[in-house]
Image (spheres, rainbow, N blue to C red):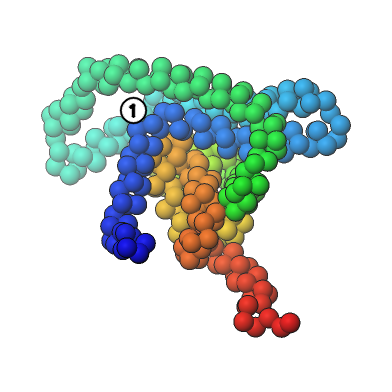
Amino acid sequence: MSASAHRLPRVSHVLIVTSGAVITLVGMRELDWLLGPFLLAVMIIILINPIFELMINRGVPRIVALGVLILVMYGLLIGLTSIIALSVARLATLLPNYSAQLAGSLQFVSERLSRLGIGSAQIRELLGSVDLAAIARFLTNHVPSLFSAGANALFLASLLMFLGIESTQVRRRSVYLLKDHPRLASGLLDFVRNTRRFLAATGAFAVIVGVLDTFFLILVDIPIALLWGLLAAACNFIPYVGFVIGLVPPALLALLNGDWQLMIVIIVVYVVLNSVVTTLIPAKVVGDLVGMSMTLTMMSVAFWSWILGPIGAVLAVPLSLMAKAILVDSDPAARWLSGFLNSDERNRRMQDADAEVPIAGEMHP
């Protein structure tokens, strides 16, 4: 019996592959507590490993270069988290100063509701429906999540330590990969380069949007504008939705100051800046830099957020690059799919390179 007789029908093959993919993705989602910190640590190592290589090439002793690498790793992580923590803490200390303004705003809302036919008794009933006991129970139920976050942070710190040490030996460890699976090795090297390009471009746009936000907030006289600008820059690493986190403090302060018109102006300006500086332009620029289509870039955020939660949103583009390198770029049979996943610029370069290679039937002796 010929080998083709034992071959599975195409539909069965597709169903088997799809089932395996679904099982794998569900398993990844269940293990997000492990995969999230691990992948975040890997991306940080990819970003800063060139510092180690540069120091080694300059003749710095290996142990000194490794120590600097570890310090930079922890400094980067602590710096970003400190900006967010400091922003929350400063907002919490500012809010009590707006008690009088808040009372005035509530009085304004009460008067507006009265004009709509909602009486004082109804307003008191509405305000009285806030169950403090329920809020307390909500906070109590979420206390364990704080311990979980602390455990994840400790796990991430440990991963950074060990992965940082292992990354200094990556050349020796990848020798057999380069020999036995050159296409996979090429795809992974391309993934590393594109990830660094993505992070560098994201950092550049983060600085731009942070500076613009800071000058704008200073112009409209929002307190501690510099801190909110830093927060906007840090949140820019969360594609498409991070700007909302950076928007809340200045908009809330404007509202509590009794200037709801200013709050609307701040929201509009932030939305416009996000649309232009952190969404439209980066979608094109970053897409060309990393060779990934704009649609795939946007879909990556939703997909990886579903798989890994907030960490997935931050690492969406690098994770898609890694999946593409392993599943598509390393497999010649999947070359047709890369045309739909690549950016237009990358497809053009690949087609130009193919045009320069003569077809076998057209080769001259």
Query: Along the line of sight, which residue is nearer the eye, 32 or 226?
Result: 32
Q: Position of residue 141 (x, y in %)?
A: 29, 19
Quarter that holds the C terminus: bottom right
Q: Which residue is at a point 35% across and 17% down the rendered structure image?
A: 143
Q: Position of residue 354 (x, y in %)?
A: 62, 72
Q: Which residue is at a point 44% across and 28% down the rendered structure image?
A: 34
Q: Is residue 77 above or below residue 306?
A: above
**Residue 335 shows in the view:** yes
Q: Which residue is at a point 34% across and 33% down the rendered structure image?
A: 30
Q: Quadrant of residue 101?
A: top left
Amino acid type at circle 1 is: Ala
Side (left or right) of 299 relative to 280 = left
Residue that protrudes farthest toward the front in the picture: 1
Q: Quadrant of residue 330?
A: bottom right
Q: Is residue 81 above or below residue 190?
A: above
Query: Along the line of sight, which residue is nearer the eye, 336 or 148?
Result: 336
Side (left or right) of 152 relative to 211 = left
Side (left or right) of 192 relative to 243 = right
Q: Secondary structure at mark 1?
A: helix
Residue located beneath label 1 in the image = 103
Q: Is residue 271 above or below residue 333?
A: above
Q: Position of residue 104 (x, y in %)?
A: 34, 31
Query: Along the line of sight, which residue is nearer the eye, 18 or 178?
Result: 178
**Residue 225 shows in the view:** no
Q: Which residue is at a point 32% across and 63% down the rendered structure image?
A: 1
Side (left or right) of 186 relative to 280 = right
The residue carrying pointer 1 sits among few (fewer than 14), some (14 to 19) or many (20 or more) residues within 10 Å by Cα, namely few
Q: Is residue 304 above or below residue 110?
A: below
